[in-house]
Image (cartoon, rainbow, N blue to C red):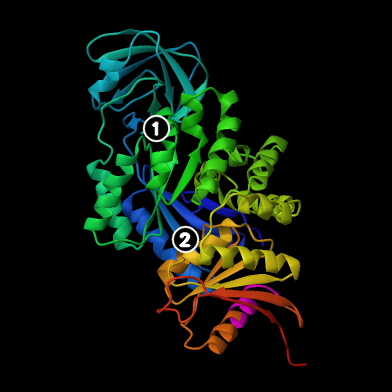
Amino acid sequence: MNKTKIVATIGPSSSDYNILKQMALSGVSVFRLNMAYASLEFAREVILDVRKISFEINKEIGIMLDTRGPELRIGGLERPSIHLEKDKIIRIINSSIIGNNEMLSVNASEIINHTSVGNNIYLNNASVKLEVISKDEDTLVCKILNDGDIISESTINIPDIKFNVNFLSNYDKEVIKFAVNMQIDYLALSHVREEMDVLDVNDLLISLNDNDIQIISKIENKDSLEEIDKILNVSDGIIISRGDLGIEISLEKLPRIQKSLTKKIKEREKICIISTEMLSSMKNSIKPTRAEVSDIANAVLDTTDALMLGEETAIGNYPLEAVKIMKSTIEEIEKDIDYKDLLSNIIKDKKIDISKAISYASCEAAREVYAKAIVCTTLTGTTAKDISNFKPSCPLVAISPNSKVVRGLSINYGIIPMTVPAADTTDELVELSKRACMKSIELKNEDKIVIVGTFPLHNVKYTNFLKIEEIKREE
């Protein structure tokens, strides 16, 4: 089992029911829908299919929705994809025309007003770079600096220029309402710049009576890097989105920033996800490059919670193969992690309460007795997350009677989430934990598991129960 989770983006290449099911069976823990491209109707169909698949294969699967965010985009094109040629001239016009390889439309006059001659403009996640060579009231005349393809409504990035755009558009408000109605598990906020962006979304969720959706902030611009501590305070997790981030900062700085962000996120005990171009070549190739495998390995060794596949599974030719390659790479690299050394480094200088002390002790005990798994009973998910943050050497089976809580653990490091009935006695708790564990992983006679939880479940406010249990099978 891979402890580092896989998030897969769903699009035209992967929305077929059978492909979704095979991807889930092959290691995907969370399916993601990017609402900058997906319609509400498409998203609804995928969500219902994922929930059905989850029931069929007896696996809890999380669902993540990305907001569009306050990003700038070109208008529609006369074809789904258009090739732009190096050294050609293209005009960007503030209008609603249908674009082609000579003229593109934008619906924000600020783009024209704030952009100057000499500025660089990046289209479609930096697939194409332009240079502004002249301008007038409603037009930018640009030189194309490299060959590349753009798609309808693709992104526009202009580094070092700040545009006064509201963070929550009417469309994103509808997406968030849709997420609440569909009981989505994770809401990924695009183009966050400061903590108030996150708090605005949190206020909207409160007004919609939803306290369960976890907010994941995407770090993809300089402002968010500068405000990362405040953003972390109000977020459940962070996506290090290397695509747009790599446009706003020099690429040679990106690996160092990824490392430092990952470390900071883990220290704050928040969800950490690495995204963008993990297996980019597999959009068109059935095999990855050596550099891509090394990129995955680096993130796994940093014990990030999850790795995200984007275009590889959304529009690529080999979505299932990309999932399988990522899973096998993760499993191979995780064999080299020294969990004893890792646990020692995590506990160093950490202030812990009673619950965290037991969470730490469960990981230490599991390692010392070579336990096959830790089983955690949890009502809110907090105990399971605490244990996950200590990076246990064995799988962590998190069980709860609350299915929403269970799905909300699907992205955390090493956790196998399961919905089970509540236990009324400690004996029931132990038996319930053993049965759940045996359903999740292969256990033999005399194998040991560590059971952790809170008992009685509703009357104690902290984790207070730890037991090492030996499996006894009848011959």
Q: Secondary structure at mark 2?
A: strand
Which of these two is toward me, 320 or 217? Answer: 217
In the image, residue 103 sits, relative to residue 391, either above or below, namely above
User: Is residue 374 positioned above or below 393 on the image?
Assistant: below
> In percent of the image, x 72 and y 65: which residue is there?
367
Q: Which residue in the protein does label 2 denote? A: 62
Q: At numbered mark 1, what does the secondary structure look like: helix, strand or loop?
A: loop
Location of residue 130 in the rendering, given as x and y in whole percent from the top left corner: 44, 16
- Near-viewer residue (428 or 415): 428
Q: Nearer the viewer, residue 11 or 421?
A: 421
Q: Residue at x 61, y 67 (%)?
A: 396
Q: Is residue 451 visible?
A: yes
Q: Position of residue 3 (x, y in %)?
A: 63, 58
Is 440 a magenta residue? Answer: yes
Residue 468 location (% of width, % of height): 67, 78
Residue 387 disc label: none
Q: Which residue is mark 1?
A: 154
Residue 164 found in image quarter? top left
Does the magenta run of residues contain 214? no
What is the crowding at mark 2: few (fewer than 14 residues within 10 Å), some, or many (at least 20)? many
Q: Is residue 56 left or right of residue 404?
A: right
Q: Disc 1 marks which amino acid?
A: Ser
| Residue range of the region highlighted in magenta in the rendering | 434-442
Disc 2/disc 1 C-alpha distance (Å): 27 Å
What quarter of the picture does the C terminus occupy?
bottom right
Badge 2 amino acid: Gly
Residue 309 appears anywhere in the view:
no
Q: What percent of the width, then of the height, locates residue 109? A: 23, 22
Q: Earlier in the sequence, mark 2 or mark 1?
A: 2
